[in-house]
Image (cartoon, rainbow, N blue to C red):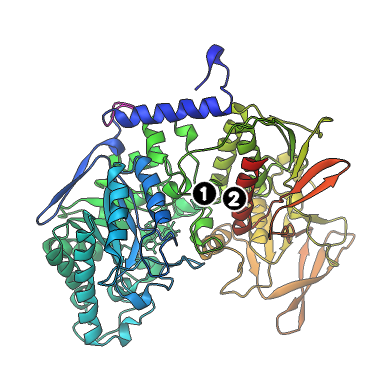
Amino acid sequence: MTGPGGLPMPGLARMAEVTRAISEATRRGPGEAVGRWLIHEPWSIVGQRNTVKAKNRIVMPAIPTGLASTQGDATDAMNEWYRARSVGGVGLILVEPAHVIRDAGARDSSPVRGEFSPRLVIDEKSDQTALRSLSDAIRSSGAVPGISLALPSERDIGAAALSDFKLWITAVAVASSACEGAGFEVIELVFSHDGLVHRSLRRATNRRTDRFGRGEAGRFRLARELARSAVTAAMSPVIVKFAIDQRRWGGLNAEAGTRLALALQDDGVAALEIVGGDRWDDASLQLSCGVGEGPVIARTSGAILPGVRIPIIASGRLLSPTGAEETLRDTNATAVAMGRALVADPSWVAKARAGVEEEIVPCIGCLGCHSAMDGGTIGCVVNGDEVHITGLHVQQTSYPLNIAVLGAGLPGLEFARVASSRGHDVTVIPGTMPLGGVTGLRSSVPGNAEFGRAFLYFGDRLREFGSGLGETIPDDCDLIVDARPLPGPKLSWAVGRSVLTASSVLGRDLHQMYGIGRRVAICGPGSLAGEVALFLAGWGRRPTVVVPGTSDNPFPDAHPMHALRLVERLAGYKCDLVTDSTPVEWNETLDRKHRLTVRRGDGTTAMLGPFQTAVEATGWSEPQVTSPTETVVNGTRTIVLGDSQSFDTVRKLVHWANQLARTV
Ligand SMILES: Cc1cc2nc3c(=O)[nH]c(=O)nc-3n(C[C@H](O)[C@H](O)[C@H](O)COP(=O)(O)O)c2cc1C
Ligand code: SF4
């Protein structure tokens, strides 16, 4: 989108133009804006007594926001969060898992780190008025309001008494009719994500010998009775979410999943949301960050379809409009659930529909949102706007400043994006780091390519808003924002001509690889060591990763899903992984058969090698994250922000960067 003469429009004018394009597209009928895209076509969920029509096939799946009140009720902030996704064009919103048993409401039933709290609770004590205002907020801005119901996850299915089963079945009925009474038009039962019912479905976790275990019919019984209970209690269509996850979790394979789907169809369930658990060990994912694109989902949901007539919602790692479209086109899925994509950009659908895909704030698959922000709420690493706000509502500045941003990591880029959109004159000075800072360096690692999406997005925004890249701080600079990472500590073992740092290795090209021998020891406290090893393995080196972590958990700093994938990829590249070891000394020899002495956890030492090169992969020191600090350096105001290799920290810094840039 360009202004007169084909020139990029300045910040706010361009935002206004994009917003106009989005709202025009929203007014137009489905498909008109971008041709006949399946994702924009309407579909129906036919329940036993009611049919619901959604205007498009994009579903917002169950994700806890941490925005409930301490009593577990809906709040204004929660209404805003979902309203933003509804205004942003989503067809069906399945509000976050609401606990049907009050005691479990405050606890974290998510399979992910971090505590999203407070959680929503739906029982006879719930505030129906608050719940109704939530469903109204969603409906009045265009989406169908649905809600997910969850059972406690901390209960052991093996230890549950028959009276517990009765209690749960009744609680689901009570909650279903309460949700319907509050205006929710679709009820989803969550039987996935390691919750109680998920554990009842899996052979590996359900060892009961009574009628709620003992064979497949027994393991399905709780799910089916809960589904029938909801179908009987509510006029609204009932959706069930479950996982095909035999290989990873010892759960259902595709055939068993199909049998469960057929049984639930007989029980009156109107649609299924399928999570593709088996995607984990798919060889095609070795080079992808996280969990694969559309075709993986396609295989999972396609496999479940023989004989199943009710719609399937394919769920898991659909990030781009083309990935979502391909899933609908190449499989029998009727709709697609997009979780993280809609966390990163509430207006994802409207932008896709308006044909401004490049405006979508990209999800880079980092899993940073899988742990809660301080205060228990959800937040995205790339999107520094408060996640319930649609678009960039910023005020044009009356006093344009000349601002230099040192460092081009996500925090620096976010600051530059918002400040330049307000009319400040911003120069970004990357220095010795690439565009993207620490995350940019890490994007050169096989499997991390998606991190690069963020820099395309920021690069486009900065160009449009008129920011430039520079090498030095301009003379007339009014404000410096220092968003560079802090160098790591000097380590006593890491001395010698053949010792390199991770930051000097990552991102090298073929010519710069000379001097790095074939056998490389890479030592660090966590996942950076593994990433450097993958990078070097991709260039034909034979890395040995040396970490202090245990063999069960070699990369404790990484999200468990990323840590697992890292281990799988290292094995795929035949990298050696030495755990429980900390480097003590690097001994160089004239014949380049260097040795590394390590101390084991039990106090003994061992000598590893020979190696030609060692890489010290401790990385960067964590910035001071209590708040950004402001000082005056050589007469120029300087705000220290920083950059980090931890996505938790980057997310915090990106949110600060956004807030700071709104106020300077
Ligand atoms: C931060 C986060 C927390 C989630 N927590 C839950 C949960 O508690 N229960 C659940 O059924 N699904 C949960 N999900 C999974 C989503 O409902 C959905 O299946 C998933 O996000 C789809 O994959 P995608 O994010 O790659 O699109 C969560 C997803 C995210 C991103
Ligand atoms: S935090 Fe990372 S994974 Fe989550 S939505 Fe944002 S970019 Fe995607």
Residue at image point 37% right, 68% down: 72
On the image, the x and y values in percent for residue 324 come to: 36, 42
Residue 34 covered by magenta stretch: yes
On the image, the x and y values in percent for residue 126 come to: 30, 68
**Residue lying farthest top?**
5
The residue segment tinted magenta is: 30-35
Q: Which residue is mark 2?
A: 655
Q: Is mark 2 within 8 Å of ligand 2?
A: no
User: Three-letter amino acid code at disc 2?
Assistant: His
- Does 177 sit above or below residue 154? above
Residue 323 shows in the view: yes
Q: Which residue is mark 1?
A: 386
- State if disc 2 and disc 1 touch (CB < 8 Å): yes
Residue 383 covered by magenta stretch: no
* Separation (CA) of disc 1 from disc 2: 8 Å
> Considering the numbered disc 2 on the image, is that residue within a helix, a strand or a loop?
helix
Camera-nearest residue between 265 and 465: 465
